[in-house]
Amino acid sequence: MSQYLLRRILIAIPSLLGISLVLFTVLALAPGDPFGELAQNPAVPPEVAASLREKFGMNDPIWERYLKWLFQMLQGNWGFSFVSRVDVDVLIMQRLPATLLVIGSSQVLALLVALPVGVYAAIRPYSLFDQVATTLAFVGFSLPTFFTGLLLILLFSITLDWLPFVYQSNVNETGWRFYWEHFRQMIMPVTVLGLFQAGVLTRFVRSAVLDVVRLDFVTTARAKGLREQVVVVKHVVRNAMIPVVTLLALQMPAVFGGAVVTEQIFRVPGIGSLLIAAILANDTPVIMAVTFVFACLVILFNLIADLLYGWLDPRISYR
Amino acid sequence: MNEREMRGLIADVKAGSLSRRAFVRRMVAIGLTAPLAAQMLAYNGVAMAQSKSTYKPTKAGGGGVLKVLWWQGPTLLNPHFAVGTKDQDGSRIFYEPLASWDNDGFLMPILAAEVPSLENGGVAKDGLSVTWKLKKGVTWHDGKPFTADDCIFNWKYASDPAAATYTIASYKDVEVEKIDDHTIKVLFSKPTPFWADAFVGARGCMIPKHVFEPYMGAKSRDAPANLSPIGTGAYMFEEFKPGDLVRGKRNPNYHEANKPYFDAVEMKGGGDAVSAARAVLQTGEYDFAWNMQVEDAILKRLEEGGKGFVQLELGGSIEFISVNNTDPWTEVDGERASVKTKHPSLTDMAVRKALNLLVDRKSVQEHIYGRTGRATANFLNNPERFASKKTSFEFNVDKAIKLLDDAGWKPGADGIREKNGVKLKYVFQTSVNQPRQKTQAIIKQACQKAGIDIEVKAVTASVFFSSDVANPDTYTKFYCDLEMYTTTQPQPDPGVFMNQFVSTEAATKDNKWQGRNITRWANAEYDALFKQASGELDPVKRAEMFVKMNELVIENVVVIPLLHRNGVAAVAKNLSASLSGWDNNTWNLKDWYREA
Amino acid sequence: MAGSTLASPTANAAAAAVARRKHVTPSQEAWRRFRRHKLAVASSVILGMMIVAVLFGPLLWPVAINDIDFSAMLEGPSWAHPLGTDDLGQDVLARMLYGGRISLAVGLCAMFVAIGVGVLVGSLAGMAGGRVDAVLMWVTDLFLSLPQLPLLLVLIYLFRDSLKAIAGPELGVLVLIIAVIGGLRWMPVARLVRAQFFSLREKEFVEAARALGASTTRQVVRHILPNSLGPVIVAATIDVAVAIIAESTLSFLGLGVPPDIPTWGRILFDAKDYLDFAPHWAMFPGAAIFLTVLTINYIGDGLRDALDPRRVL
């Protein structure tokens, strides 16, 4: 197992490099121009745009730009945004707290809701609880987040006037009011995102538990006289976790750069909206930095998931 | 309207029987800009007036926080690098120019002691120089005094090609001389009719020499003050998160007494226009929202809540459809829509006239843009009162059908008209934008009734308006038959606006499609008129030439104008926001206040 | 005498009985079990009806989809307009029937593409292990890391014109959208299938099959795959909803079908700003997407119960 781990880590580095190369090439080939707005403005002579492109090295061949970027990255320099004229790591750090708070909370919420609901629904399939949970789960993911977000805003902000819907990253309160204000403005975006993910996760948990619950060893455990709770938690859930762990590992990186629509609706200054703004403005250094971190997270979490399989199901061997 | 009529009106103003404001409004109505109209007055000896200030509060401060919402947040705060209006609006909170254009088109002095004119000797009679007298006692936010040295520095900073500033066009052809600590002289290389460009408005904001001097030329991007501005404005810098938040606090040493009213200003960015409107008009979370590109029906319903209202400002933007003179479906030397080709059907005058008749401007205005637009037949605008017989708009499907029938375009088996094997099938593109897509749907339906088949295409805005040479969907490439968008007038002077129809400006592969003549139209009479107008010093004669050029464009249906668009903002009900259609929304932030 | 021993009467009867009892193939057995799953059958019927409606509906409801009528804007359901009208006075029912073709086609086909590719990659990786697994997982990680938006832009610009030339303008764009959406959703399926394979590979029944001489392919197809369908089916239902929404996201970027084609996601997007005074406009496409997802899910449940040999129905 440790050999496997070592091998995987060693492979991770070249695979990360390979991914970064492909990412860079895709971005270089994508149409669009960071200095496009200039062309619209008749007061700006075309030489200005041309000299800017030259200055940022945009006329160099792709491999040369990639190598430059790579060396800079290795030295800890994450690049300089064309649009904001600010270091990329400063931009990312400014957005990290809001992202972790809002998007992170929604993932945690989704997990806390999906696990118990999914397990209970699977243990009593087609019961009332199951039907209700299933329907709610479907509502959760068949409606796009822009829609549910808007519904919540209409209900809680406009009609009831209970909650603010524009997220403020600086709350000028002190003491308990600080936390209360933060909480109030977080409820809606966290709910919107969490609902979507909880819907998805609940279905997977339910399906996985259903697969396991009819197996012989569960019947045996029950026959042995173990309490239902012990049977469920120690035997059923642990064996059903494999698909759930896979899915969680796939969801985790989305915290960093995934919740674009929710961030836009509630104006949460997260990394997702930074990414989309950079993509639309063709601000390549920002896009590269964010997607590179994203790629690292993807590889990391998938590795953790692979290792967890072995722990969850001891029969799995690593070849 | 011709030169004689214009001079008659100017005489009326001089005699006192017509107010300056009314004159300006009439000139705007025939399509000229307010600043140009004001200039016409000034040139003819009518003193440049200033609009009376409506500022009521009697002391500075005490107004709490002003919260404004810009649904595209500013990404940098150096006015010389500000690309779109969002960045200009953000920097304008902290920086000021020498003078600016108010809503009536008059120049209002800010850092200047008075506006230069022919009477006070500020403007030279030969059009070769302008002398500005600077206000005394103005200090930067860090306490240092503002002097003529700062103006000279701004000129040097902006005109340096190595810095690649976006304001370079206003400074590279002039020279600035220091007369004394509070007087400067701007020298032009040739007689310049429109002198109020350098140091005026959005492109004239002053940055301090003592902060930015070490960062000129190629080092300009490294200046830390790019992100923490030090200016002369009513608010001092507090915090900046690019794309998200700009915060400022009241400047206690501001150079105008009793201003500003608010203790702090917070500009939040992100989201979309509709939710921004809701935040101001429905929940009252914000006091002001910028650029409400929202259907008027929605805005009206939001206003019913009574928490705020929609404020409209007249400006120079026009939404129009360009008609391609070249053939976008044939490739010549690796270029489509090349000037070497001719469009198979759109060069037929009957087809163009028919298309003009098939655009239901009235419905588009009524049901989509509402108060935010005015249907128009002119490229430079015109309401019915001054409708020239040569340029008017009409929506008549039957007339269009008759025109096409008479010209030999008969419906084929599939209902689409054709002649000599050429079908009237067009691709009509625009940017992704709800009101625009609805407009396209309305036009498509009308054309269908007349036997013209339209394929609607929407391109994402950042691609459509880009200048990427490799991308086939940009508006300059015009690789389709019809396209629709809004041209804004970033310059108060129509000259730059009208060079879109000069044949030498045609966008081609050679100039990397940077030419401004997108329709690739070529007309000798127009070219001659334009050349004349560029050198003409008398603004009245110039105005007449612009009106003639407009008529040429419309008669030949080079473009199909749709509507003249106003600047639309959502304002909280007690807020008095001083806006101008000829400058940024925050141009006069110092004068904003809240009624008790 | 040789051969004159009488066979027992029961043996004869038994042999005759065996000959008489119908030979039930596994697929017939699966069909029987599917039929017993009431919800699955009902769902198939409903989904079938929806497909028929979008295919033939426009023939029976001949109202034009872009008949602009300013006098009838944002009206609720009525006899003239059973599902109401939108903000340009166009009939919502006609638009939903027309756009439904594209929504359903994209939703279902993209789902099949994602599932197909995902199952293939996942089973290969799960079964082979070692180097093949490492390479396939690297490809999966690569696709997972790719930012979808720039990738979409690149692909669509590269292939739009050539596809239009081959398959005609509408079909070409449709093929491209299905390929793109499906092509970006296969990764979770692959990882889920692979994980299932890891654990199922070691189970006794697989070992037994191996001992009986089953080839790897047979093991996979007959034994392991049917047992790993659980997460696949859940992923399929989710993918349908995501694909329908993704198609509308593409059109916001100007990359999908032209904006005047009223796909369900597009209608939902157009209607969102009018939620507080014309909720009917958004309700119907939302309900349609919800119904599609629901029916696919129950059909999937039915399939799983039908194919899973461990279920006792």
Image (tube, grey):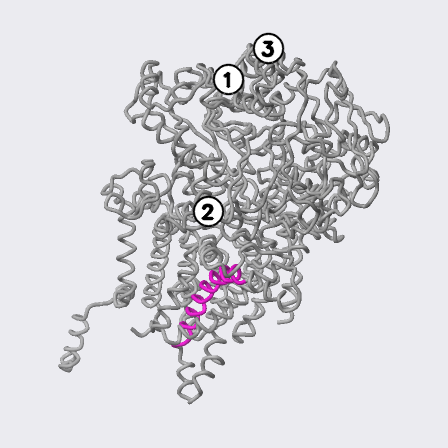
Cα–Cα gap, marks 2 and 1: 39 Å
- SS state under label 3: helix
Pointer 3 residue: B528
Chain letter belonging to callout 1: B
- SS state under label 2: helix
Left/right placement of residue B315 relative to residue B403 reads right
Give the residue displayed 26% in from the left and 47% down from the top: C78
Asked whether B153 or B578 is in front, the reply is B578
What percent of the width, then of the height, locates residue A47?
69, 28
The circle on residue B553 is 1
Q: Nearer the viewer, mark 3 or mark 2?
A: 2
First-in-chain label (1 vs 3): 3
Residue A288 position (above or below residue C25): above
Few, some or many C-alpha atoms within 10 Å of disc 1 (few <14, some 14-19, many ≥20)? many
Pointer 2 residue: B302
- Identify the magenta region: A187-214
Give the residue displayed 52% in from the left and 14% down from the top: B1
A206 in the magenta segment: yes
**Badge 3 amino acid:** Ala
When asked about the image quadrant of residue A63, the answer is top right
Asked whether B325 or B49 is in front, the reply is B49
What percent of the width, then of the height, locates residue A85?
71, 43
**Badge 1 amino acid:** Val
